[in-house]
Structures are given as C-alpha cells and as structure tokens.
Image (cartoon, rainbow, N blue to C red):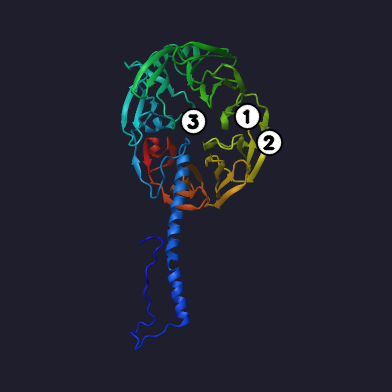
C-alpha cells in the first residue's frame, strides 16, 4: 500500500442487526466518521516515525562506537549480557598478553622467560589463543645457559602495547652460563659469564632475522629507530644511542649516578617517548633523539601528551613538560587516563583529597573542580572531550575543558571497580566487598543510564581489555579466558 493511499473502512452504527429501514446518520456520527477517516493513519505514522528515530539513533550510536574503537584501549566489539568465558591460550598466555604486540596477521606476540632455559617469543592467535609459532631468542640451551632477563619492544612506545600492529620485535636478552656470579655479587662480578644480545624478530615470518652482541649485563630499549644501550659502572651509567638497524652511533651520554648493585635488571626503560634510567640517587630522563638529559627527580612518570612529571615522596608534584623544562607545581596527584583519544589537549585531571580537578598541564592553573571520592583502581577515560570517572558511590561524566557535568548517576557502593568501554557503554567490573562475586555493569555513554548488570563467571578473578579484546583471568593468572 502506498504511503499516500487510505483504505476504505466500513463502519456500522448498530451491530445488533440490520435496520428495518435505511437511517440518515446523525451529525455527530458523520463528524466521527470524517475524523476517523482523516486521522486513522496517524498511529501508523507515529509508529513508523518512532522506528525511523530508533534506526537513526542506532546508526549514530554505531557511528560513534566505530569512531571510539579507533582509540587504543577501547574494546572492538559490543559487550552483551550474559557473559561467556572461553579458555584462551596456554599457561603462559597472561605473560604474552601483558606486554604483547599485535602482528600484521592478527596474532599477539610477546616474550616468555622460563624458569630454566632460553627465552622465547610466542605468537598466539588473537581469536582462539592457539599457539601459531614460537621462536627462541635466548641462547640455545645446552643445560648450561639460562635466560636471566629478556624484554621486547616494537619501538613504538607504551601506546603500542597490545594495540598497534608492528612488524618487528627488538628483544634485549641476557643469558647466564652456569658459572655466572650470584645476583648478590657486585655488578662487575655478575657480568662474568653473561651474554647480552639484541635480537630482531620478524613478526610476519615468525623468525629471528638478526642479532648483535652488546656489553654483558647491558640494558637496552628501542624508541622509534634509535637503539639506546645502557652500561653500568662504579661511578655512573653510560648511554649510547645508535641506528637500530645500521648500528651507526648518534650520541653518547654519561649520567653520574650509579645503578644500585642490588638491582639486577629493569633500570632502563622507555616511557612515553622518554628513556628513563633508575640511578641510586634519582630517576633520570633522557631524550632518545639526541641523548640530552631532560630531567631528574626522585621518581618520574609521564602525563597526557608525554609530558614528564616529578613525583616526590614528600613535597609538591612538579609538571616538567614534554622537554623536562617545566617548573609548575600542583596540589594533588595526576590521575591516569586510559583510554585517551587526545581530545581536550592541555587539560590534566588531578585528584586532591575529595575533589577532582582539571588543571592546565603547562602551568598547573586550576580550570575546574568537582567533589568526587576518587579511587586509583577505578580508572578514568577521556573520549571526545568528556572525562568519565567512577568512585565508590557514583559514576559520572564531565566536560574535560570546562568541568560542566554531562551526567552523574548514583551507584551501589563497591569495594573494587574498573572502568572500560566498548564505544557504546561504560563497562564497570564491580565487587561489593572482598567476599562478593564480581559482576559487570553496562552504563550508557550518553546518559549514564544502566543498561544491564550480569555476573562474571565465578572462576574469574578480574577482567581487563587488551588489544581491543576483553579478557579475564583466574587460577592465579595461569588461566586466561576471552570474554564475550
């Protein structure tokens, strides 16, 4: 039937039986018939309009979800209740996921260091967790060599972990012969019997395609196309930056602060485009491009925009900026924000007692503040200019630039909570107390309205997103599950 056509409707005034003689309809009956004939399509049109509006709303929600899912840390699929948990990967799957890298063919690859024997890079199928390939990056074990430490990076920095696709893993591997000195010995003695190498793993081929010797006991990381190697001495640390592929040296920097002799490894790392060195007296930040010492402090970390921040155990927090030259201070402690799509640049969320503030990341000036019972385990998300937060009694969303409230909804008190999103809902794993079971609740991103709450399979201790996928783990971390 065409949209502008109207069906003829036969109306009877008396259904008890046919009248003895034709009657002339009353004026009221004629008006009723005319109105009914004129307006009867209105309910149908209303239904059609509601269906169309729902379709438009769903399309907009899908479009927004697609946009948000381009941000690392946002789940790639809509999560629905009830949840199913499918075993994923072997016993070392959690190790692979925790610092894994996505490969061009849909795998997740990461390094595994066994208790005995050489380290290996393992690639697992992103869908099923099935092992696709495994390649040794430590020395071939003869019963005399075991990997002491191994760390791998794609060179793209923290944001690429389990989210961005990479073609190469660069692994720094230190193996020890059976005669190597005990870990409690001085650094010079511990270096005896050690072999440290930089190993290049082609993630498409699943094979080692290169290796070079480094000084025994050295630490190394790759940032972009720069290999930074650190060697420790009695009086300090020597850093050298070179082309990761060609080996041509670009710079060298000395830091007059020795590494604690009791610190076996992990004293050199890259964070947000900075190379951090943990000395005895301070933590030092070095620019990997030219070796310039950017800053030093008791403890260093990075904020939004890879800006450095000094986090002393006492005294004010200092905002050092991206190059380490900043001098601003602030009250409170910066809140970690993840996922973060980079919107509302220059605004840094900060917690100070019972308030959350938006401060200028360069000057520390307060732009806005609101009461909130912050919880460091909750997590905070910043997407399309909106900061989402959670505490023990409420879930809320505010304009990250102005602090204007977008919405706020009370929630049941929880002991433990973690915020995530699939682009359509805020997902919060919740536990009322340490003895209660874990549940997952979904709240509409635009309004905060709770859509559903469902139990998490009881054998799971926690949920977390990695590479756009929702995982859970149990059994002390030896059992990993994919959640749908």
Q: Position of residue 185 (x, y in %)?
A: 48, 15
Mark 1 highlights which residue? 312
Q: Which mark is residue 159?
A: 3
Question: Measuring 54% from the left and 19% from the top, which residue is drawn there?
Answer: 288
- List the single residue furthest toward the bottom: 20
Residue 445 visible in image? yes
Counting from the top left corner in percent of width and height, residue 239 is at 53, 14
Quadrant of the rendered image containing residue 178:
top left
Q: How far apart are labels 3 and 1 at the CA level?
A: 25 Å
How busy is the neighbourhood of tag 1: few (under 14 within 10 Å), some, or many (20 plus)?
few
Residue 214: quarter of image: top left
**Which quarter shows the C terminus?**
top left
Q: Which residue is mark 2?
A: 365
Mark 3 vs mark 1: give the one in front: 3
- Mark 3, residues whose alpha carbon is within 10 Å: few (<14), some, or many (≥20)? some
Identify the element where label 3 is drawn.
helix
Task: State left or right for residue 412 relative to residue 294.
Answer: left
Q: Nearer the viewer, mark 1 or mark 2?
A: 2
Label 3 to label 2, Cα distance in Å? 27 Å
Q: Kindly check if marks 1 and 2 are in contact, taking CB atoms under 8 A apart as contact.
A: no
The answer to whether 71 appears left or right of 147 in the picture is right
Vertical position of residue 439 compared to residue 238: above or below: below
């Amino acid at each position: 039937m065409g949209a502008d056509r109207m069906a003829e409707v036969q109306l009877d005034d008396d259904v008890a039986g046919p009248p003895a003689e034709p009657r002339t309809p009353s004026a009221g009956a004629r008006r009723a018939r005319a109105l009914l004939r004129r307006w009867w399509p209105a309910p149908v049109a209303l239904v059609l309009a509601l269906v169309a509006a729902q379709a438009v709303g769903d399309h907009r929600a899908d479009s927004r979800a697609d946009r948000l899912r381009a941000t690392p840390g946002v789940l790639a699929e809509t999560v629905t209740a009830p949840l199913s948990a499918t075993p994923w990967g072997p016993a070392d799957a959690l190790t692979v996921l925790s610092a894994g890298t996505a490969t061009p063919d849909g795998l997740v690859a990461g390094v595994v260091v066994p208790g005995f024997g050489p380290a290996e890079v393992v690639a697992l199928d992103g869908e099923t967790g099935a092992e696709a390939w495994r390649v040794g990056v430590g020395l071939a074990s003869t019963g005399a060599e075991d990997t002491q430490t191994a760390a791998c990076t794609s060179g793209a920095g923290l944001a690429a972990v389990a989210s961005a696709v990479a073609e190469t893993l660069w692994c720094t591997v230190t193996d020890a012969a059976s005669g190597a000195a005990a870990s409690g010995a001085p650094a010079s003695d511990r270096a005896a019997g050690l072999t440290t190498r930089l190993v290049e793993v082609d993630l498409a081929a699943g094979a080692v395609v290169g290796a070079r010797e480094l000084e025994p006991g050295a630490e190394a990381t790759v940032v972009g196309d720069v290999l930074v190697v650190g060697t420790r001495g009695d009086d300090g640390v020597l850093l050298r930056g070179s082309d990761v592929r060609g080996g041509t040296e670009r710079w060298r920097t000395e830091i007059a602060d020795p590494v604690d002799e009791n610190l076996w490894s992990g004293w050199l790392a890259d964070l947000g485009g900075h190379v951090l060195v943990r000395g005895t007296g301070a933590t030092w930040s070095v620019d990997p491009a030219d070796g310039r010492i950017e800053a030093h402090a008791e403890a260093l970390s990075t904020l939004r925009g890879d800006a450095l921040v000094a986090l002393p155990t006492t005294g004010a927090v200092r905002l050092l900026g991206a190059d380490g030259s900043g001098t601003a201070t602030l009250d409170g402690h910066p809140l970690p924000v993840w996922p973060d799509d980079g919107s509302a640049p220059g605004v840094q969320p900060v917690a100070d007692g019972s308030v959350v503030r938006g401060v200028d990341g360069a000057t520390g000036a307060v732009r806005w503040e609101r009461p909130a019972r912050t919880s460091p385990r909750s997590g905070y998300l910043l997407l399309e200019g909106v900061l989402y937060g959670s505490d023990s009694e409420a879930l809320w969303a505010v304009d990250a630039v102005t602090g204007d409230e977008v919405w706020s909804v009370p929630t049941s008190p929880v002991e433990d909570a973690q915020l995530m999103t699939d682009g359509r809902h805020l997902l919060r794993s919740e536990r009322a107390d340490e003895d209660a079971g874990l549940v997952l609740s979904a709240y509409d991103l635009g309004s905060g309205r709770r859509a559903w709450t469902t139990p998490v399979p009881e054998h799971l201790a926690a949920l977390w997103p990695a590479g756009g996928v929702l995982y859970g783990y149990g059994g002390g971390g030896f059992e990993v599950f994919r959640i749908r």
